[in-house]
Amino acid sequence: MHYTASVKAADGVYGVEPTPTAKKIRELFYNAHYVEDHTGILYALGFPDFVCGPTASPAERNLVGLVLKVGADVGKLVLKKRYSAVKIFELTSGRPSHPVAALPGGWSKRITEEERKEILACADDCVELAKLTLDVFDKVVLQNKEYMALVTGDVYKVVSNYIGTVDENDKVTYYDGTQKIVDTKGNELGRFKGIQYLDYIAERTLPWSYQKAPYLKKLGWTGLVDGDGTSIYSVGPLARFNVASGFDTPLAQEAYEKMLAAFGGKPVHNTLAYHWTRAIELMHAAETVKKIASDESITDPNIRQELGTPVGEGVGIVEAARGVLIHHYKTDDKGIVTDANLIVATTHNKGPMNIAVKRAAQSFIKNGKVDEGILNLVEIAYRPYDLCFACSTHTLPGRIPVRIDIIDHNGDLVKSLRNYELS
Amino acid sequence: MKSVIIGIGNPNFKDDGVGLKIVEHFEGVVDTVTLLNIGFNLIDSLLGYEKALIVDGVKTGAEPGSIIEFDVNFWGNVYASGTHNFSIFEIIRIGYSVFPEEMPKEIKIIGVEVEDVETLSRECSPSVESAIPLAISKIKNYLGLQ
């Protein structure tokens, strides 16, 4: 996701637009990545809370536990078909992971007709994977009254504004488009592209956090509070659902309408619905891959623009799987970056996530009683946002340590819970 | 025996790249794979091999440069819940659950204790750099390449 935001910013630095074919290949690559990313998040991190139970022990509540419940055959099918998305990365970007094809103004790897046909076959697998995923979600969550009460209830709910990317028809899109803002009631507050983000988003430094807290500039800083009038906003799959008028592919649109009917309208503020919208987007991305791969013009060899002297500044904005991602670079006359600003989805969602955790903690911790099950019920509150801490977890054991301190009204520590062992 | 060596890490963050540096020594000798992060791509890299060796930087509290070997027994102590990340052990466990016939019969994980994984540099700390020959020797021994 950063790779694509970065090359779009680099386009801006050189003042070029990619050739039409390069743009199509980038979008194909990007949507395939959506398929792979949403699959991983749903099956490894989202579904286990439901399939294995929200208060199951961490030893059971994971993808292995999920496979045990739904069957190894389903697990095998999911991972095999997901690999088709990875194969598309390789065919479009030269490598199955860590692509090496992006260039300012273009793309270095063209697609042959033989490769296009192979991508098309992989796209069918991606669509099948999406159908299976929507089916699993339907059986596991939608048909379970207890879980639906959690999904539609008030505990996992944050009333915020939303920012998401739409195309010229106001439909959800990921690689390119216009960033649209709606308020807590769904009224449009504005739209921006590129460097205009500076007119709409401000970042506040907080004394207690290394992470900045973005807010809607025109509404002013209202603090980390939700409800009508707040200036905090959310991004990600649910935000896209809330700002757009639907999807431009048939099966995703069908799933969108089903969710819209279930909630009786928009905006939906229930954070567990992030998982539902993620499953819908998996379908949308798969269908988009198929649509682009069906276009024979993607084999055109004209995939790179000539570059001139850098103009010195570029902003690349994409819809990352977990929300709006902004890369903003300033460079010298050789194109060397002298200043950079990145606003990633986890930063945009800082306010909503803090509120989500607080609300869950206040709802589940009663009379000083706290246990591991409650720890997970709080984790569930922020997991839908799919926090991106991967960069800090490249070393073993590769997981996020979480500690929760329960403080009473006098400020005294009642209990401390953690999901890691002290060495 | 069909073998693969998988290096995990980010080459731009000092000691985090140690696994990748070690794997470089085996390119052209056995199949090698480098991964910047861990996900289902680890399973993709393991399927079809009989023996696999994973090399990564680790933080266990030992002296920087220490070589720490992990085996399957470590998996039982690893929690699986998370937000956006996977652990090596969980991913391998998933691989064995879903593809019992296609996963390697033997997997060993060689960890090199890191000192600094936050500084932007392509060079490892001296203590970690000096551990590379020993790690290579252990891998050669394990794969019968001595």
Image (spheres, rainbow, N blue to C red):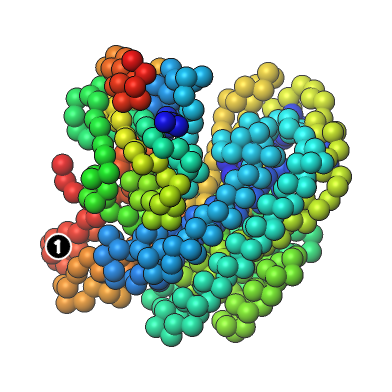
In this view, the residue in front, B105 or A394, is B105
In this view, the residue in front, A393 or A216, is A393
- Determine whether A176 is above or below B137 in the image: below
* Percent coordinates x, y for residue A402 in the rendering: 28, 53
In this view, the residue in front, A155 or A128, is A128
- Label 1, secondary structure: give it: strand
Q: Quadrant of residue A18?
A: top right
Asked whether residue A314 is in view, the answer is no
Q: Chain of mark 1?
A: A
| Residue in the image at 72% along x and 48% along y | A119
* Percent coordinates x, y for residue A167 in the rendering: 75, 58
Q: Which quadrant holds the N terminus of chain A? A: top right
| Residue in the image at 55% along x and 67% along y | A133
- Determine whether B48 is above or below B28 in the image: below
Residue under label 1, please give it: A415
| Residue in the image at 75% along x and 65% along y | A248
* Percent coordinates x, y for residue A373 in the rendering: 25, 69
